[in-house]
Image: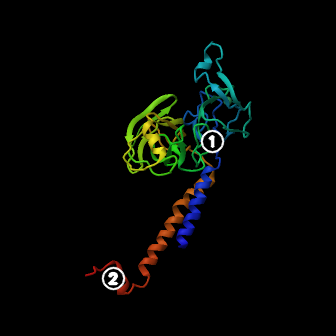
Amino acid sequence: MIFLILFSIFVILASTSIAYAEDYVVDIPFGAYNPELNTPTDIWYDPSQMFVTVGDTITWYNDDREGHTVTSGQSAGRFGWMSDKQGKFGEPDEIFDSGRFMPSESWSYKFEESGTFSYFCTIHPWMEGIVNVEQTIPDYPHDAYGNKIEMFPVIQYTPDKLIEFDITWEPNVIKTFEKTKFIYQTYDGLTNSNLDKMKYDIIITQNSKILFRDSGLTQIGGDYRNFIFETAGPIEIRFQNIVSGGTSGIESVAREVVDNSIFRTVVFTAMVYDNPEKTSTSEIVIQPARRMDIYYEFLVAAILVPALMLGGLIVYMKYRKPKKYSDQNKFGAVKI
Ligand SMILES: [Cu+2]
């Protein structure tokens, strides 16, 4: 029991801490000022590519002997600055700009929007870096309009209020490249009885493109479909051509009207989030090279604490008094 309580507290702590914004560090190494001198790895911002989520802050430390900038936009490239063309020192896009900061100084920037941001140094245009900012994944679902979905199932009625569609999806937070199961049930809008043998078309749309289309028949008043999304963004789950099979035996006024009505539609919306763990192309290492110490301590705790608890449990099982035969009989022996 104590084990369970401790473990639950631990899990709660673990899940809440993930929600906090993280701080990251990028180093401007010694030698960055000189493209001839180079740095040991030809990296002028280290790490040169960062993967963060919205709300995270990156601090750039100048460990070099000259001043540098962190300026969003396109650099001229390692050799581009030698050419005569316009904008040879790069093209700032004015999203962020540190201005010049001197040796052993630092500059921080909080990323409030998702996207890919390339940046460079306006003094030394061979210095390039890139920041990938992922959308934050909330631990609760949203509809397509950004409203939090407070409760499952989500309920919709056909415009004539005669048919109720309830929908739930699992997991509740829809992420790209992860199987989502849509589970739905149909009810008589007036009597609240399950509507069995209800025919419908299910259509899932994203960015006005139909991703999925299927026809179905509710068995025991409900059905489900699995789907994997490849793109983040709002989606629409539409049930249309809802037609009652009329074989469930439910007798009501609503039922008769339902049987006479051919086309009915209910529309649900939801948000699909970028999956930080899975991508379509290759497995990208999401964790950057440097994170704050707390994170490592936390990881150690995440492995050690349950391991110690499990160890304790094993020792306890091994050395506790053997149970009486009568107790074992309950599980071990076959009753004749
Ligand atoms: Cu510089």
For the residue with label 2, is its CB less than 8 Å from the closest atom of ligand 1?
A: no
Distance Cα–Cα, label 1 vs label 2: 56 Å
Pointers 1 and 2 in contact (CB under 8 A)? no
Q: Which mark is residue 329?
A: 2
Tag 1, which secondary structure?
loop
- In depth, the one of 95 and 170 nearer the eye is 170
Residue drawn at point x = 60 percent, y = 15 percent: 83
- In depth, the one of 180 and 162 nearer the eye is 162
Please identify the quarter of the rendering in which residue 333 is found: bottom left
Residue drawn at point x = 52 percent, y = 63 percent: 304
Residue 60 point in image, percent of width and height? 67, 39
Mark 1, other Cα within 10 Å: few <14 / some 14–19 / many ≥20: few
Residue 156 point in image, percent of width and height? 54, 43
Q: Is residue 247 above or below residue 93?
A: below
Q: Which mark is residue 197?
A: none
Residue drawn at point x = 61 percent, y = 26 percent: 126
Q: What amino acid type is highlighted by mark number 1?
A: Asn
Horizontal arrangement in the rendering, residue 104 relative to residue 279 (left or right) = right
Residue drawn at point x = 42 percent, y = 46 percent: 224
For the residue with label 1, is its CB less than 8 Å from the closest atom of ligand 1?
A: no
Image quadrant containing the C terminus: bottom left
Mark 2, other Cα within 10 Å: few <14 / some 14–19 / many ≥20: few
- In depth, the one of 336 and 231 nearer the eye is 336
Q: Which mark is residue 147?
A: 1
Q: Examine the rendering and report whether any part of residue 54 can be seen.
A: yes
Residue 305 point in image, percent of width and height? 54, 65
Eye-nearest disc, 1 or 2: 1
Q: In the displayed image of the protein, which residue is found farthest to the left?
A: 336
Q: Is residue 308 above or below residue 128?
A: below
Q: Is residue 271 above or below residue 297?
A: above
Please identify the quarter of the rendering in which residue 282 is found: top left
